[in-house]
Amino acid sequence: MSLVQFAVLFLFLVGFVSVWYLFNYFFGPRMDDPDGYARVAGNCGDTMEIGFKVEQGRITRTHHWTDGCSVSGQCVESAARLAMDKKPEELEKITMISIMDQVGQLPDTHLHCAQLAETTLHKALADYRKKETLSIK
């Protein structure tokens, strides 16, 4: 493979990944006015976002996003999936262990992804509780 062919292939791959990322970021489903929402940046540089809607005392819709690696994506998606159809107070029971059980075996170098997903979900719950407290007053 010549240097020119390698450069063309490299630029094609960079372009493909860039378009995929921008498409998912700008055209991914967003949730308008979530009842609970959090966006947390981890020490690793990954950012996760979770939002949810509560209807009749249960979580009926969730939204999740990350700019991190595929493991981060799996963890935040699993946290959002585990939250579905639960009462808000049941979200406290969702831990990094339950997220890892859902995702499967994680490498030791990516355990922090499950912890960041747990933290993001619990901060979204705290946001929900704060909004509920303000609406009662």
Image (spheres, rainbow, N blue to C red):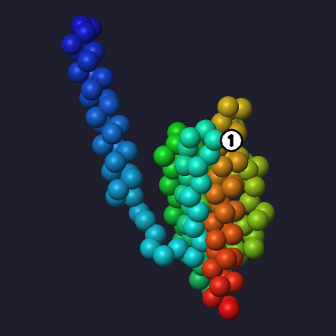
- Whether 12 is drawn above or below 115: the answer is above
Q: Position of residue 133 (x, y in %)?
A: 69, 84
For image coordinates 35% across by 37% down, the residue present is 17
Query: Mark 1 packing: few (<14 Cα in 10 Å), some, or many (20+)?
Result: some
Q: Position of residue 83 (x, y in %)?
A: 65, 65
Which residue in the protein does label 1 denote?
112
For image coordinates 44% across by 73% down, the residue present is 32
Residue 83 in sight here: no
Residue 127 in sight here: yes
Considering the image in quadrants, where does the C terminus appear?
A: bottom right
In this rendering, position of residue 79 left or right of residue 66: right
- Point out the residue furthest to the bottom here: 137
Location of residue 111 (image quadrant): top right
Q: Position of residue 101 (x, y in %)?
A: 72, 48
Q: Position of residue 135 (x, y in %)?
A: 63, 88
- Report the amino acid beneath label 1: His
Tell me the element at label 1: helix
Could you say which is closer to the camera, residue 119 or residue 29? 119
- Point out the residue furthest to the top here: 2
For image coordinates 59% across by 54% down, the residue present is 40
Considering the image in quadrants, where does the N terminus appear?
A: top left
Location of residue 46 (image quadrant): top right
- Whether 46 is drawn above or below 121: the answer is above
In this rendering, position of residue 52 left or right of residue 9: right
For image coordinates 51% across by 50% down, the residue present is 66
Location of residue 10 (image quadrant): top left
- Whether 14 is drawn above or below 77: the answer is above
How many numbered discs sit on the rendered protein?
1
